[in-house]
Amino acid sequence: MKPAVCRFSISMDPELAEQLDTLTAAKGFANRSQAVAHMVRDELVDFYAHQGRHEVAGTVTLVFDHHHRDLQRRLTSIQHDFQQRIISVMHVHLDHHNCMEVLAVRGPAEEVRKLADRLTTVKGIKHGTLTLTTTGKEFSK
Ligand code: NI
């Protein structure tokens, strides 16, 4: 059976350690260990997101003017091409002109990236971002 925790010591510049303590308090982590574990998971998520075949989850956020000619038809067409990777879509009418679409996505990192690239480069998109996270499988707790 694996032990509940693994203890090890870290050496770092005292100034950096001080900043770590400031950050730990400001963010509300219980202690250094929790803060460092959070950072390690953050780095791992980023690492896995760059392994092309690794399964990731994430969101694609798009802001656009729905009056822009042909834009919605193009977005829909791309979404149908990648329908296996899209779990859910939320469309919000921000004002008279602007819409925000948030897509929950899942799949191999390279395919999710390809989908995000296709959508964010459609002419008329004011801003488009991809945020990748874990499917949760890498971390048992
Ligand atoms: Ni709308």
Image (spheres, rainbow, N blue to C red):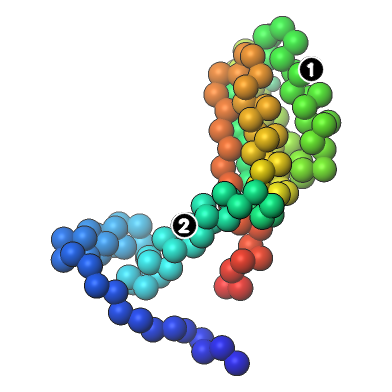
Label 2 belongs to which residue?
A: 43
Camera-side residue: 79 or 25? 79
Number of other residues with Cα within 10 Å of mark 1, as a class: few under 14, some 14 to 19, many 20 or more: few
Q: Is residue 95 left or right of residue 85?
A: left
Going 27% across and 62% down the picture, which residue do you hit? Answer: 20
Residue 70 appearing in the image: yes
- Work out which quarter of the rendered image holds the N terminus and state it: bottom right
Where is residue 19? Give x, y as percent: 22, 59
Camera-side residue: 67 or 39? 39
Label 1 belongs to which residue?
A: 73
Q: Is residue 76 above or below residue 58?
A: above
Q: Is residue 14 left or right of residue 8?
A: left
Q: Is residue 12 left or right of residue 83?
A: left
| Cα–Cα span, label 2 and label 1 | 37 Å
Amino acid at dot 1: Arg
Number of other residues with Cα within 10 Å of mark 2, as a class: few under 14, some 14 to 19, many 20 or more: few
Q: Is residue 66 above or below residue 109?
A: above
Going 51% across and 60% down the picture, which residue do you hit? Answer: 44
| Residue found farthest to the bottom | 1
Mark 1, secondary structure of its residue: helix
Where is residue 6? Give x, y as percent: 44, 83
Where on the picture, by quarter, is residue 98? top right
Where is residue 24? Give x, y as percent: 31, 62
